[in-house]
Amino acid sequence: MTDISNNIRAIKNQIHELEKRYHRDPDSVLLLAASKTQSIEKIQEAISVGQTHFGENYLQEALEKITAFATKNLTWHFIGPIQSNKTKKIAEHFSWVQTVADEKIAQRLNDQRPDHLPPLNICLQVNVSGEQTKSGIYPEGLLPLAEFCSSLPRLRLRGLMALPEPKLSIEEQRIQLRKLLLLFNELNTRGFRLDTLSMGMSDDLEAAIAEGSTLVRIGTALFGARI
Ligand SMILES: *Cc1c(COP(=O)(O)O)cnc(C)c1O
């Protein structure tokens, strides 16, 4: 067994244990492999043990990987910051974009999504930590952005995503992640049919599952430290 296949098995076990511990439905948390900077060979190893969802942050690097694995049935999520001049390729090559945080980017992704593909799945990235340097829409702006995105026919608004502040205790992580859960519930109460709460990375996996995450984005714990 390679490290990566062992790591994937260990993380899946951990997810199952946490689902039980926090009274979550079995298999309600999807594992996304955050594969930025990782080699084609490492991704191949993950695929060989059944991993199908991958998240990438840098467009050029991602396109090479998507091309290399074009014959596999993989689902690619864009999880990095989006510049306007990158939206066309993102709309053409990804199934999901998790980092939508303003109307202009949403409109461009909608307009550039090719007709032969299904609508692009999106999550809105929310700034729940209040850090000035973090990308993401502030909670106050979320409802109008969600309404705008729902009106775009080539996008499908699936949920919310957040990156909490690093190096918090589990209790502090849970406080920040709970903000995202409450916003998610509030939008669903208003009639949005969101099914994806994307939160949880290598260092806040437990807090995220405790607070209702349905999709965890794991890099380091799966592939080892990034070089
Ligand atoms: C890199 C990255 C991750 C994975 O982080 P790890 O701490 O390595 O698990 C998750 N989400 C986003 C948006 C990332 O950029």
Image (cartoon, grey):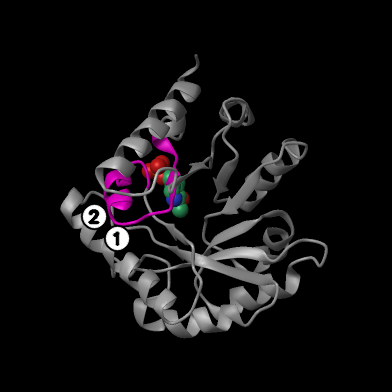
Relative image position of residue 32 (x, y in whole percent): 50, 44
Q: Which residue is mark 2?
A: 173
Query: Residue at label 1?
Result: 177
Question: Up-down: is 208 above or below 39?
Answer: below
- Residue at 57 percent of width and 26 percent of height: 49
The crowd level at tag 1 (other Cα within 10 Å; few <14, some 14-19, many 20+) is many
Q: Tell me if label 2 and label 1 are in contact, CB under 8 Å.
A: yes
Viewer can see residue 225: no
Relative image position of residue 83 (x, y in whole percent):
59, 66
Q: Which residue: 54% across, 51% down?
A: 57
Q: Position of residue 56 (x, y in %)?
A: 56, 48
**The disc labelled 2 sits on which kind of residue?**
Gln
Q: Secondary structure at mark 1?
A: helix
Residue type at mark 1 is Leu
**Highlighted range, magenta:** 201-221
Q: Secondary structure at mark 2?
A: helix
Q: Quadrant of residue 116?
A: bottom right
Farthest-out residue, right: 116
Give the residue at x 49% y 72%: 101
